[in-house]
Image: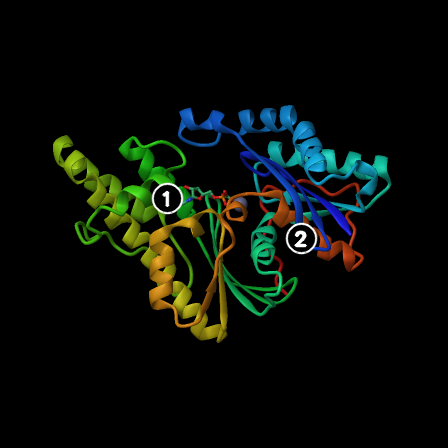
Amino acid sequence: MLVLGIETSCDETSAAVVENRFKVRSQVILSQLEHSQYGGVVPEIASRLHSKNIHRVIKEALIKANISLKDLEGIAVTHGPGLVGSLVVGLMYAKGLSQSLNIPFIGINHLEGHMFSIFLTYPELRPPILYLLVSGGHTEIIYMKKYFQYRVIGYTVDDAVGECFDKVAKMIGLPYPGGPVIDQMAKEGDENFVNFPVPGHGDFNFSFSGLKTAVLYYLQKQKHDFIEKHIKDILASFQKAAVSALCDRLKKAIEVTKAEKVAIVGGVSNNSYLRKRCAKELKIEVYFPQRIYTTDNAAMIAASGAMRLERGERSPLSLPAKPSLYIEEG
Ligand code: KG4
Ligand code: ZN
């Protein structure tokens, strides 16, 4: 079964073709670099760029997959959560294409897409899997009991961890997105230089806005020269606190779920310090998707969509874009 995936929930316009669920025939990701000068994603600019580029991104994905439109058997599209103006562009395109080709389409929860990203790299992996989903928009611990059966163990009550990396980078004057830059710079820093509090909210939930404020207050108290001299140490200390919050809660979640496999997905799963800490501290197998499937991509949407379509699921033409969409437990 050949399924086209479409992802436009934030600042990536992406299209992919998967064959038989998890074999990626092609993937195109157009990252909107236009936002970097603003230090974050500007929703209006994002939706305009999606509209401008979606047609050629999809066309390119079909060419790369060496297929034409009539070979497609289904369409999977992110319908939430995300920026409403951006979601609508992908969703409308999917609806139009499904009508004109007379093939079904299915709306996919972006978070479920991230969870399915692991199967693109490890198609033989089977649930139950405990997920740490860490990105610019989300920080969640979710237990996938079976495909499409979830239990949400923990979530963030305020900022997402990736957002926190981005905001700290912005405070220091580093470019957006800040996560990869901090990751690199912190490698040469002393993680014990500043003792930032490890943030959290109860046993399983996350809270990163306090850590962000702690870094801001710390910076405000220091002289410019001192910050310049110790920037790598400050970033390494921040990163240690943020990653400790993730590892601590993940360990508790492993205990309560008795999980035997962990998958860490989403943009922040690229963080080298997080990977190092997990390898050292978690006593069970930890899986990471290939780099191209960590940040927002359409292949992960096509993967979960292909499975849902195989099960006979269909979305109606009335399906709305849902800026706030949660994982349904069951
Ligand atoms: O999954 P993603 O592309 O978008 C959302 O769904 O939000 O994740 C983007 C986020 C950004 O906040 C970026 O700073 C962060 O992932 N990120 C990282 C690293 N690479 C990307 N954060 C920490 N370390 C990294 N190496
Ligand atoms: Zn995402």
Q: Position of residue 74 (x, y in %)?
A: 78, 46
**Could you tell which of marks 1 and 2 lies nearer the N-terminus?**
2
- Give the residue displayed 34% in from the left and 59% down from the top: 276
| In-image side of 189 versus 160 (left or right) | left
Residue 164 - label: 1
Distance Cα–Cα, label 1 vs label 2:
34 Å
Taking the spot 42% from the left edge, 49% from the top edge, the residue there is 270
Q: Nearer the viewer, residue 26 or 289?
A: 26
Crowding near the residue tagged with mark 2, few <14, some 14–19, many ≥20 C-alpha atoms within 10 Å: some
- Residue nearer the viewer, 207 or 114: 114
Number of numbered markers? 2
Indicate the position of residue 297 as horizontal and vertical percent values.
58, 43
Q: Quick check: 205 left or right of 73?
A: left
Residue assigned mark 2: 23
Quadrant in which residue 16 is drawn: top right
Question: Residue 202, can we see it?
Answer: no
Q: Residue at x 20, y 45 (%)?
A: 233
Where the C terminus falls, by quadrant?
bottom right
Place of residue 268 in the rendered image (x, y in percent of width and height, measured from the top left): 43, 49
Is 269 displayed left or right of 8 in the figure?
Answer: left
Establish whether ligand 2 lies closer than 8 Å to the Cβ of label 2: no
* Vertical arrangement, residue 102 with respect to residue 60, above or below: below
